[in-house]
Image (cartoon, rainbow, N blue to C red):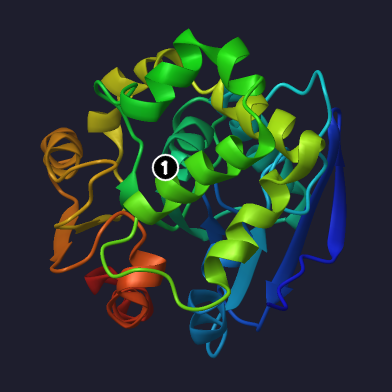
Amino acid sequence: MSWTPVEEFETPEGVVRWRVLGSGDPVVLVHGTPYSSVLWRDIAPALARTRAVYVFDHLGFGRSDQREGQDLSLAAHARNFARLLDHWELSRPSVVAHDIGGAVVLRTLLLEERDYRDLTLFDAVTGGEWERGLFRLILEHADVFRELPDYAHEALVAAHMRHATHVGFRPGVLDAFLAPWRGAAGQAAFYRQYSQIRQADTAAYEDLLGGISLPVRIIWGREDRILPPEYAEWLHARIPHAELHWIEEAGHLLQEDAAGQLSALLTAGFPSDG
């Protein structure tokens, strides 16, 4: 699968790799864990017909640098996202975020004080009691997970990724998602990033969610088993002016389960855009 972010941005802890497609009003797509900008391979070209679409791999993910000692907390990712926006000279882009990307962009908005034109969050970590499942197990037993035999590690990561899709992956897609986490270095990088993702970094801005005034859209897969629908309802209760859209027969990875419906919602814009 050919999808390579070719541009480089130097952060204090390594290189973040990114790319831009198309031209026009800017929109930035922010992935979550344990994925990369490969998630946007269908969505980005669709949006790039009318807009400049920015994609990147978080530090420690995909094609961006992976190395020991990196700060891969949500707070650090938010600082890096703020730096990227400054580097791109984007003062008010549209922002679309998935999974922990939601927490990253909310911290950047509310604590790093960068502004957006509008914000779309789908199947996203945003707040509440989300430190559960695999997150909690890795936090509590990080040393054990790091010592897994390579075949057991790959089987675990593959199973976790399959659990995120309701309809299954197309040929070759799962291999592309697994590639950054294979081998000794990839295995270390996988548990390095998971062991630093903490609920405390979303609790820090929860009381500010009600003050968000820009247009917000929430999109959620009805069959999400990673972040079930009550997480969408939790967020909507705290940003009550937000649009809430449900996608039926889709899980956590809307990019895989419902790329057409997701693209249609993203290209439709917000009512205020008309």
Across and down, in percent, residue 32 comes to 50, 46
> In this rendering, is residue 270 above or below 77?
below
Horizontal placement of 23 versus 116: left or right? right
Q: Nearer the viewer, residue 203 or 118?
A: 203
Who is closer to the viewer here, 226 or 48? 226
- The residue located at (42%, 13%) in the rendering is 200
Residue 33 percent coordinates (x, y): 52, 42
Residue under the image location 14 percent in, 46 percent down: 229
Image location (x, y in percent) of residue 223: 17, 56
Image height of 134 relative to 60, above or below = above
Q: Quadrant of residue 51?
A: bottom right
**Residue type at numbered disc 1:** Gly
Image quadrant occupied by the C terminus? bottom left
- The N terminus lies in which quarter of the figure? bottom right
Camera-nearest residue between 33 and 114: 33
- Please give the residue where the numbered disc 1 appears in the rendered image: 102
Residue 120 visible here: no
Label 1, secondary structure: give it: helix
**In the image, is 11 to the left or to the right of 208?**
right
State the image coordinates of residue 219 (x, y, percent, origin top left): 24, 59
Rendered residue at 30%/38% (across/down): 212
Does residue 233 appear left or right of residue 141 in this picture? left
Can residue 61 be seen?
yes
Q: Is residue 34 left or right of residue 185?
A: left
Residue that lies at the very extreme toward the bottom in this rendered image: 49
Snapshot quadrant of residue 260: bottom left
